[in-house]
Image (cartoon, rainbow, N blue to C red):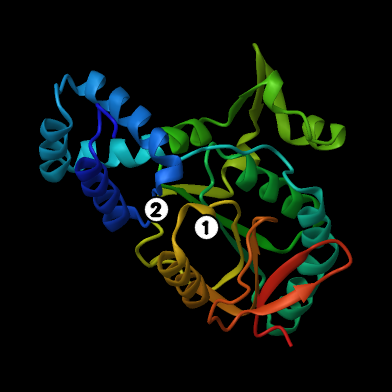
Amino acid sequence: MSEFLSDLDFEKYKNFIYDKSGIFFSNSNRTILESRLRERLRTTKNETVLDYFSLISKDQDEMEALLDSVTTNLTRFFRNTAHYDTFINYVIPDIVKKKQSSGNKVFKIWSAGCSSGEEPYTNAMILTEHLPPDFKIEIIASDLSLKSLMKAKEGFYPSTKISGIPDNYLKKYMDPVENGYKMKDSIKSLIKFDYHNLKFPSDSKNFDVIFCRNVLIYFDELAQKNVIEGFWNSMGDRSYLFIGHSESLFGMDTKFEFIKTDWACIYGKNVN
């Protein structure tokens, strides 16, 4: 038994976090929760886990700060080349064809769990590069971490973080500044960064593509199913879902269709 967090307290915090966010802590990642709790107790000057639990039960801001601290924000530009090969060569041409015939030339993407912004900025650069000039781009980028969202909105990345960006993209869409690079305003203007808890449905609808990669792994089976159903309801007719390469909808009762392209496996809504 942990001296810092008893089994009873662990169950209490585990259930609280799950109820508020859908994030599931098992015994195997209990140490992560304990570490984050120690940090929050020091920051808020609470002496015991019981005192801190009382605080998060009545203080919305501190509850969100805890949820922020327990999320793992790992990302990079052009993460998973196979996904972007599929996006450029398969998904974009199909959606463009559909939209040209319908006359609705707005390409709408949701980057769910966007962390510090590398994924939505990658998507914005790719769409700017590959869409016909008369198309409009709308990107919603959401996360549970307010700290990550503030960093993403700024659009600054140190030189160590821009590996993976092709040279032509770097020159065209980013400006060199002291100690790194900053996204050009023309790219930043395409993205709306917004706090969103995936436990709850999104108000935005008719997305052509949703990227939610390496987020489902933090949820249990029931929470995963609810998130996937939420995505289905938020997506437009003939649309596509990208999840992490280690994630799968296999065995889940879902209406999404499995799609195996020449580059990667993705999921589609009403694509056949």
Front-most of residues 120 and 250: 250
Where is 61 relative to 42, above or below? below
The image position of residue 43, as x and y in percent, is: 25, 20
Give the residue at mark 1.
Answer: 216
The alpha-carbon separation of the residues under discs 2 and 1 comes to 10 Å
- Dot 1 lies on which element? helix
- Mark 2 touching mark 1, by CB under 8 A? no
Q: Residue furthest front?
A: 1
Q: Is residue 11 left or right of residue 207?
A: left
Q: Residue 164 falls in which quadrant of the image?
A: top right
Residue occupying image coordinates x 33% and y 42%: 67
Image quarter hosting the C terminus: bottom right
Q: Quadrant of residue 6?
A: top left
Left or right? Give the position of 34 relative to 52.
Answer: right
Residue placed furthest toward the top: 178
Q: Nearer the viewer, residue 234 or 134?
A: 234
Circle nearer the N terminus (2, 1): 2
